[in-house]
Image (tube, rainbow, N blue to C red):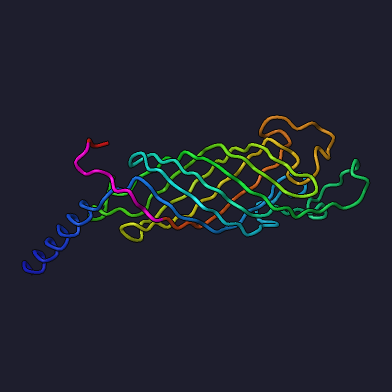
Amino acid sequence: MRKVTLLLLLMASTLGINAQTDDEYLMEVGGGMGLMGYLGDYNGSLTRGLQPMVTLMVRRNMNAYMSFRLAVSMGRLKGDERNAGTYYPLMGGTAYAFNRSVTDVGLTYEYNFWPYGTGNDYYGAKRLTPFVFIGVGGTYVSGAEKVFTANVPLGLGFKYKIGERMNVGLDWAMHFSLSDKLDGRKDPYGIPSTGIFKNTDCYSVLQLTLTYSFMPKCSTCNKD
């Protein structure tokens, strides 16, 4: 029994030493795939009309808790008045539907809870890191009438370290735009839209990401 206990303690200490000597990386690059959904005058459901989307991204890790992410995403926004359950008398009584391509460019600030290698680690090798984020971005929607506007993304997610340099993540965000014309129609209620939250269009993004870490942090430099 003593030999088994000694062997287990030796294995645990070896795993702890290996995890603690893992490099910290300052940069990540990768991409993602997921679903994008329009929310506005012609759709009020988070799960209706979801469309595929793709993302290219770069992340700069400032320290164990803070990161900045620059991402370019492309997808589609789709809606139909017949599914909205609302009648718009100013639109002439004809059911309106749209399916428009959208490009989103955003810079977000991420705060990591229990980042890699901190907290109550299992053998010093914590791999799961939840995070929240907020940022600023730009939205371009094509169609008969092109629209370019700013948006504010707000969301949450988690990252999982599947290898020394590979990370997989899942995140969800709501992008609040400053425009009510992402669907091609402005103020169908006849009520002027102002600011971020008053009668403006928005869209959600749920995506799975895969990133590659590079640029190891200097192990002999000042600690965070």
Query: What residue lies at 79% left-to-right and 45% top-to-bottom?
Result: 145
Q: Is residue 197 left or right of residue 206?
A: right
Residue at the spot 78% in from the left edge and 53% down from the top edge: 98
* Image quadrant where one finds the N terminus: bottom left
Q: How many marks?
A: 0
Which range is magenta? 212-221
Of 192 and 122, which appears nearest the observer? Answer: 192
In the picture as drawn, the residue positioned furthest to the right comes out as 92
In the image, residue 215 lies in the stretch drawn in magenta:
yes
Residue 133 placement (x, y as % from top left): 49, 41
Query: Viewer-proximal residue, 25 or 155?
Result: 25
Give percent across and percent down for residue 5: 11, 65
Residue at image point 27% right, 36% down? 224
- Judge whether 73 appears above or below 61 on screen: below
On the image, which quarter does residue 80 sit in?
bottom right
Can you tell which quarter of the image residue 149 is in?
Answer: top right
The quarter of the picture where residue 26 lies is top left
Between residues 134 and 72, which one lies in front from this camera angle?
A: 72
Q: Position of residue 76 (x, y in %)?
A: 68, 54
42 is within the stretch colored magenta? no
> Which residue is at 61% across, 40% downward?
138
Give x and y (percent) for residue 155. 53, 44
Q: Residue furthest left?
A: 2
